[in-house]
Image: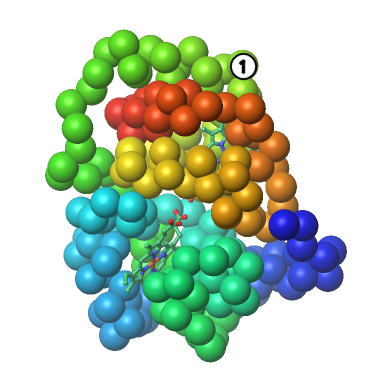
Amino acid sequence: MRLSGLFAAAVLAAAFPAAAQDAARGRALAAQHQCTACHGENGRSAMEGIPSLAGQLADFTTIQMILFREGLRQVPPMNQAAAGMADKDIEDLAAYFASLPPGPPEDRSPRDPALFARGEALIGPRNCGVCHLPDFRGRNQVPRLTGQREDFLAETLKAYRDGRRAGVDTQMNGAVVGLSDAEMEALAHYLAHLE
Ligand code: HEC
Ligand code: HEC
């Protein structure tokens, strides 16, 4: 899905607010809205298919919440959670989750050296590190990938490829063109096991 230039400008304006964000207020909002019931008490998800938010970049989280709120990224529980939420609340929630230390989930699978190597071999030719940075800690609206759940990474890559996940632009849809399920699972395994 391609968003209009006007909408993209509105998203960017919301993502780079002049006012300071308040992580302490975001913490209270996270409890009130029960974000942590799904995303984990410390922002590290223990549930399959649900991403960790700890250490995620605030600009990325803010933009994704706006996409959920506007129904542009379709995930029913998240469209519901973000419905009618004020920009300031979204920014404070994003600041709170960005302030939590990232790390792997407790139920991370052991590292499979062959699968890890297959993923590593795909990363360079696909230029993944050019946007996500070579250590995959992300930058601005390009998300951190280290510490993320492997099942979520594999599933969301397939969603971009199959047109089930829309972002602010089509960069990610382009980045995964032609990748097979097995290649995406190898990429997810590699990224989930980076320290
Ligand atoms: C009922 C469970 C549930 C609740 C409550 C919930 N989420 Fe989510 N959240 C999800 C699921 C499921 C996904 C993503 C699934 C997907 O893309 O397939 C998600 C995705 C997200 C993402 C996108 C992260 C990424 O890496 O792509 C953000 C940001 C997010 N949630 C923030 C929040 C915030 C903030 C709250 C509280 C206001 C919240 N969520 C409440 C289930 C929940
Ligand atoms: C041209 C820049 C660019 C390249 C190349 C790129 N990405 Fe991304 N990636 C992005 C942006 C921007 C987003 C956020 C898009 C959105 O709004 O959904 C993203 C999102 C993601 C997400 C979603 C994470 C989350 O928490 O929701 C994953 C996983 C991901 N990229 C993996 C990869 C992999 C693996 C590669 C290489 C095959 C790659 N990316 C190449 C820019 C890029």
Residue furthest to the left in view is 106
Residue at x 77%, y 70% (from the top left corner): 7
Can you say whether 113 is above or below 20 in the image? above
Q: What percent of the width, then of the height, locates residue 118?
A: 42, 14
Residue 112 shown left or right of residue 171 in the figure: left
Residue 73 shown left or right of residue 82 in the figure: right
Residue 179 appears in the rendering: yes
Residue type at mark 1? Pro
Please count the marks in the image. Answer: 1
Q: What percent of the width, then of the height, locates residue 119?
A: 43, 20
Split into 4 quadrants, where in the image is the N terminus? bottom right
Residue at x 61%, y 16% (from the top left corner): 125
Does the residue tagged 1 have its C-beta within 8 Å of any atom of ligand 2?
no
The quarter of the picture showing ligand 1: bottom left
Q: Secondary structure at mark 1?
A: loop
Residue at x 72%, y 52% (from the top left corner): 169
Residue 141 shown left or right of residue 119 in the figure: right
Q: Nearer the viewer, residue 80 or 13?
A: 80
Residue 92 appears in the rendering: no
Q: What percent of the width, then of the height, locates residue 116?
A: 34, 18
Q: What percent of the width, then of the height, locates residue 82?
A: 48, 78
Q: Which residue is mark 1?
A: 125
Residue at x 84%, y 64% (from the top left corner): 5
Quarter-wise, where is residue 73 in the image? bottom right
Can you say whether 37 is above or below 129 in the image? below
Residue furthest to the right in view is 5
Can you say whether 177 is above or below 107 in the image? above
